[in-house]
């Protein structure tokens, strides 16, 4: 998967684009992915703020997807 990032005029990431083929695979495996409750959106925002402050702690998307797949096997 090749993700493309969108940045605002300050250079802060504001969006991510992934190919539709990859998105379709994700939504097939995780059908409720679009039903994100407000508390979870807040948590995501907090984590994004942390990532912005500590980009050295990012992991490749392939590693993240592999981790999700391992969780599905449990």
Image (spheres, helix red, strand yellow):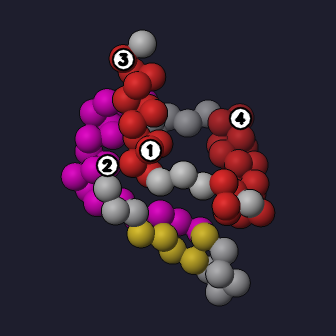
**Number of marks:** 4
Contact between labelled residues 1 and 2, with CB atoms less than 8 Å apart:
no
Depth-wise, is mark 2 or mark 4 nearer the camera?
2
Q: Secondary structure under badge 2?
A: helix
32 is higher (above) or lower (below) than 18? above
Residue 63: which disc? 1
Tell me the distance, in whole angstroms, between the alpha carbons under discs 1 and 4: 26 Å
Residue 37 is drawn in which quadrant? top right
Q: Mark 2 points at which residue?
A: 23
Q: Name the residue under label 3.
A: 73
Depth-wise, is mark 4 or mark 3 nearer the camera?
3
Q: Position of residue 16 (x, y in %)?
A: 47, 63
Does the segment drawn in magenta span residue 73? no
Tell me which label, 2 or 3, sits earlier in the chain: 2
Q: Position of residue 12 (x, y in %)?
A: 66, 74
Tell me which label, 4 or 3, sits earlier in the chain: 4
6 is higher (above) or lower (below) than 18? below
Residue 39: which disc? 4
Give the residue drawn at x 40%, y 25%. Answer: 70
Give the residue drawn at x 66%, y 54%. Answer: 57
29 relative position to 63: left or right: left
Magenta range: 14-32
């Amino acid at each position: 998967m090749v993700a493309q990032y969108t940045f605002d005029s300050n250079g802060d990431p504001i969006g991510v684009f992934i190919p539709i083929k990859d998105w379709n695979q994700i939504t097939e495996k995780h059908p409720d992915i679009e039903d994100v409750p407000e508390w979870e959106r807040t948590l995501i925002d907090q984590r994004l703020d942390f990532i912005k402050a500590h980009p050295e702690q990012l992991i490749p998307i392939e590693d993240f997807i592999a981790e999700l797949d391992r969780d599905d096997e449990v």
